[in-house]
Amino acid sequence: MTAPHQVGHPQLCVARDNFDDCSTAELYHNMKGKGSWPVRTVCPFCGHSILTVTTPYPGILTWLMCISCLLGGCVMGCCLIPFCIRALMDVKHSCPMCHRVLFYHRRL
Ligand SMILES: [Zn+2]
């Protein structure tokens, strides 16, 4: 029985010594600027060709908008609106096969 592909280490980094350093730096370089929408890529952890799964989560911009609303007098729950607007939230891209986080898209 043979393994179909390497599992656990990014393929880009097979010939290198420092796996962690390489995976983080090269991933960030490859994914930088891809935005908040799903990206088609090859997962460096499991080797599958995937479309990233995006998960919005509150980031710095979301909290700034929330605080701005509070300071502007919106105290009846309007300050929570930024948490419902995807365009104001950071996005986490993860692999649908191995569920590892590939990179984060941050608004600020
Ligand atoms: Zn994967």
Image (spheres, rainbow, N blue to C red):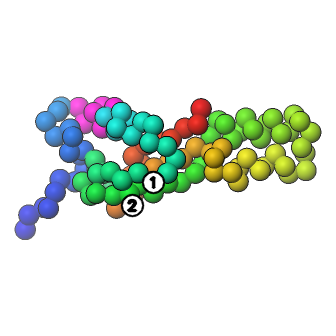
**Secondary element at image label 1:** loop
Relative placement, left or right, of 41 versus 16 is: right
Up-down relation of residue 105 to residue 86 (above or below): above
- Point out the quarter of the image occupied by ligand 1: bottom left
Please give the residue where the numbered disc 1 appears in the rendered image. 38
| Residue for point 39% across, 61% down | 96
Relative placement, left or right, of 38 versus 27 is: right
In magenta, the rendered stretch is: 18-25
| Residue for point 16% across, 57% down | 5
Residues at discs 1 and 2 in contact (Cβ within 8 Å): no
Q: CA distance from mark 1 to mark 2?
A: 11 Å
Q: Is residue 95 visible?
A: no
Relative placement, left or right, of 3 versus 99 is: left
**Rendered location of residue 63, percent (x, y):** 71, 39
Prevailing SS of the magenta stretch: helix
- In front of the other: 3 or 28: 28
Magenta stretch holds residue 19: yes
Seen as rendered, the residue at the extreme left is: 1
**Rendered location of residue 105, percent (x, y):** 50, 41
- In front of the other: 55 or 9: 55
Up-down relation of residue 22 to residue 48 (above or below): above
| Residue for point 29% across, 51% down | 42
Please give the residue where the numbered disc 2 appears in the rendered image. 96
- Mark 2 lies within 8 Å of ligand 1 (Cβ measured): yes
